Amino acid sequence: MTSGTADAHSAYLRRLGIGEPLGVPSAAGLFALQRAHLERVPYENLDIQLGRPPGIDPELSARRFAAGRGGYCFHLNGAFAALLEALGYDVTRHVGGVYKESDSGAAERGVSGDHLVLTVRVDGAEFYVDAGLGDGPHEPLPLREGAYGQGAFEYSLERPEPVAGEDRPAWIYRHPGSSAPIVSFRAEPAATADFEDEHLRLSTSEDSAFVRAFAVLRRDADGVDALRGRVLSRVDPVKGNTERVLDGPEEFYATLEGLFGRELDDLTPADRAALWARVDRAHTVWLETRREPGEN
């Protein structure tokens, strides 16, 4: 590891609130790292919305996180994998795919390639690790078939039956009702280069959800905060879900910095004006689509 990479990882750990050496790899350490990552590094597409998508080189992502930025799955899981490896964890990257609940059959038959999944072996066990879903598990899940509860949230992992001649996934993760209700992934190890083409599509194509709409999410032990366009929501199965529309750019940017921990010192006044105009315009279009036929 170069001194530059080591410095980036040290700064990355400080972003996670970890300033002291962690000792030897352990399941407890892995769980603590994923919790800290989800709570402190937001899932967000701000730079994609501004037309300047950052690359997915893990060292670049680590430096961005240390500076207060976030990212989406290729950034989040890519940098997290490199950090875990630097700390001595046995990490494997996998090509995955995110599906809607209505596309369950497609998820069982193949893998779309639009998601990066991690598995980690530690303390004689293997875990499904994902800091890149936005509203996924707060802690790793044992890589075994079954249902798993974390607080009031329920998840499951299953192994589809292999079929000769078909590119069936090795594993399927399910979290009904979330923004990523189904994730399938292959068993084979992958590398950063395997995601470059899909990153280009997702971050630049007009048919990509990341290009079409602004979103930022943050997971904690009790629930999920999400800002989609101007709509701020909180998913909390115990206290109840809430939703409201942010009033204007001042509240929008204060929420990004305060609730989601996304530093904004990289934005010029022109950037702020352009992003708010885009978000507000999309919100107006969204309201139009929600109107009932015949409404004014």
Image (tube, grey):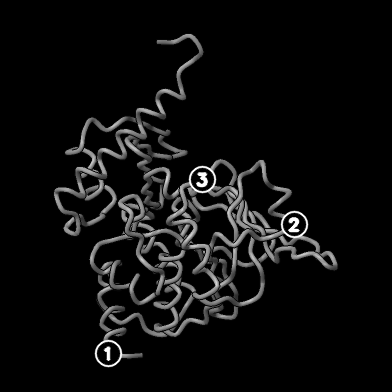
Image spot of residue 154 (x, y percent): 57, 48
Labelled disc at residue 109: 2
- Circle 3 Cα neighbour tier, 10 Å, few/some/many (<14 / 14–19 / ≥20): some
Q: Identify residue type, mark 2.
A: Arg
Residue 153 vertical position relative to residue 110 in the rendered view, above or below: above
- Circle 2 Cα neighbour tier, 10 Å, few/some/many (<14 / 14–19 / ≥20): some
Q: Nearer the viewer, residue 173 or 263?
A: 263
Residue farthest along the bottom direction in this orientation: 2
| Circles 2 and 1 in contact, beta carbons < 8 Å | no
Residue 15 vertical position relative to residue 9 in the rendered view, above or below: above
Labelled disc at residue 34: none
Q: Nearer the viewer, residue 90 or 46?
A: 46
- Lower sequence index among marks 2 and 1: 1
Labelled disc at residue 3: 1
Residue 109 vertical position relative to residue 7 in the rendered view, above or below: above
Element type where label 3 sits in the image? loop
Q: Identify residue type, mark 1.
A: Ser
Distance Cα–Cα, label 2 vs label 1: 44 Å
Q: Mark 3 points at which residue?
A: 179
Residue 44 vertical position relative to residue 87 in the rendered view, above or below: above
